[in-house]
Amino acid sequence: MRKELNRLWSEFERLWRLGERYSALLNVAEIHACLEKLEPNLRREFESRCQSVQLTRDVLEAADAGIKRDERRILRVLSVGNLWNDDEFLLLITLKVQTDLLLAFLNARGKNLRSESDAKCLLAIKAAAESIENRNAYRQAVSLVRQNWRLPVPHELFVQYPKSRKNS
């Protein structure tokens, strides 16, 4: 796990140097999300690194703009038609999880950034996933996410929809 954490931190530093604040913060947010699952020494080390990230006004504005952009993208994809493939669900899940992780990181740092579309995006993804036509594609996307996400990041979209129902 240390190797993946160091990889994410290096990517954060590279993007930060390039001025890509939003993309850089997504890496830190992913690290932050799994701190609870780390052994104590590793946790302290990476918690300290996460706390060292300077959250200036410009950084917070970049985070807010990036979150809004990604949420608009989610809603735009879901507004076109009613049948999606596993690649589209993979994109939707990834964007939503990343924005949620970033909001959680910022809130943990006392920066109460709010998202007006947060609940709308989550409900739209869940509704799409629960439709009979999309179930298999969603399940395939969740399987891919579980295989490809290298850290133990928790999120409610990582479950298999739909929950078992009597009349499905």
Image (spheres, rainbow, N blue to C red):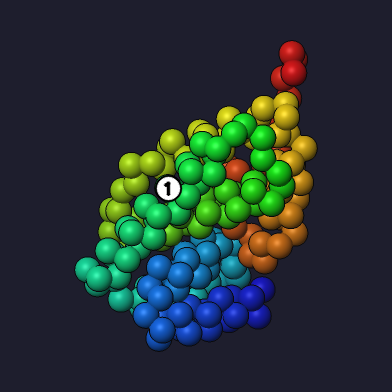
Q: Position of residue 106 (x, y in %)?
A: 35, 60
| Closest to the observer, 145 or 9 | 145
In this view of the protein, which residue sits in the foreground, 146 or 141?
141
The residue singled out by tag 1 in the image is 72
User: Front-most of 93 and 111?
Assistant: 93
In screen coordinates, is 79 left or right of 150? Answer: left
- Within 10 Å of disc 1 (Cα), the crowding (few <14, some 14-19, many 20+) is some
Determine whether 77 is above or below 11 in the image: above
Q: Amino acid at mark 1?
A: Arg
> Residue 122, how many percent across, how many down?
50, 39
Could you tell me which residue is drawn at 60 percent across and 80 percent down?
A: 7
Circle 1 SS class:
helix
78 vs 99: above or below: above
Residue depicted at 59% across the width and 34% down the height: 81
Instruction: Give the residue drawn at x 31%, y 48%.
Output: 114
Quadrant of res 161? top right
Could you tell me residue 5's position as x and y percent? 59, 76
Q: Does the rendering let one see residue 47? A: no
**Left or right: residue 150 compared with residue 110:** right
64 relative to 11 in the view: left or right: left
Residue 120 rendering spot, x and y as whole percentages: 43, 36
Figure check: 88 above or below 9: above
Examine the rendering and report whether any part of residue 52 can be seen.
yes
Q: Quadrant of the C terminus?
A: top right
